[in-house]
Amino acid sequence: MSKFSSFKESQLLFENWRGHVNEALSPEEQEAVDAVKDLDSEGEAKVADALSGGEEDPMSLMEDGHTDVASACRRLKTSIEDAQEMLNVLTQMDQEGDLPSWWMNKASIASDYLNKMRDYLLH
């Protein structure tokens, strides 16, 4: 089986599973899922503000509930904080300097994973 057909099979299984999960959701839960799917300009503004380093209530990073969406939001917020700290250090370093290859490999993989996650949510 090729990697592509294996991926398509996995994708179909996931879509089938997701359909069954959506059937089991209460109206309130379904409304919350739909709200996340239909990210409005306010939500996009919050993401842009977080990416630009805008100030946010520190307690909002401490609580996230026990659901996938809340946990994902928490993980992305901590990723943004970590990336900002690394960017601050890197901008102070000699721009012609070297970094270990293992570090650059991890940065490439992290960037690729985030890009694929974004593509999944937006497309």
Image: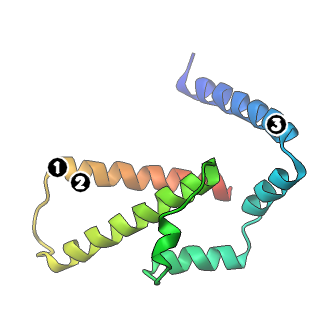
Tell me the residue at 76%/37% (across/down): 18
Residue 69: x %, y % from top left: 63, 53
User: Going 52% across and 81% down the picture, which residue do you hit?
Assistant: 49
Along the polypeptide, which appears first: circle 2 or circle 3?
3
Please tell me whether mark 1 sits on a helix, a strand or a loop.
helix
Task: Provide the residue designation for mark 3.
Answer: 19
Amino acid carrying mark 1 in the image: Ser
Disc number lying in front (2 or 3): 3
Whole-percent x, y for residue 114 in the image: 47, 55
Which badge, 3 or 1, comes first in the chain's sequence?
Answer: 3
Q: Residue at x 21, y 72 (%)?
A: 90
Q: Position of residue 88 (x, y in %)?
A: 25, 76
Tag 3: amino acid: Gly
Query: Which tag is nearer the camera, tag 3 or tag 1?
Result: 3
Asked if residue 100 is positioned above or below residue 92 in the image, the reply reads above
Q: How many angstroms separate mark 2 from mark 3 (CA)?
A: 39 Å
Q: Which residue is mark 1?
A: 101
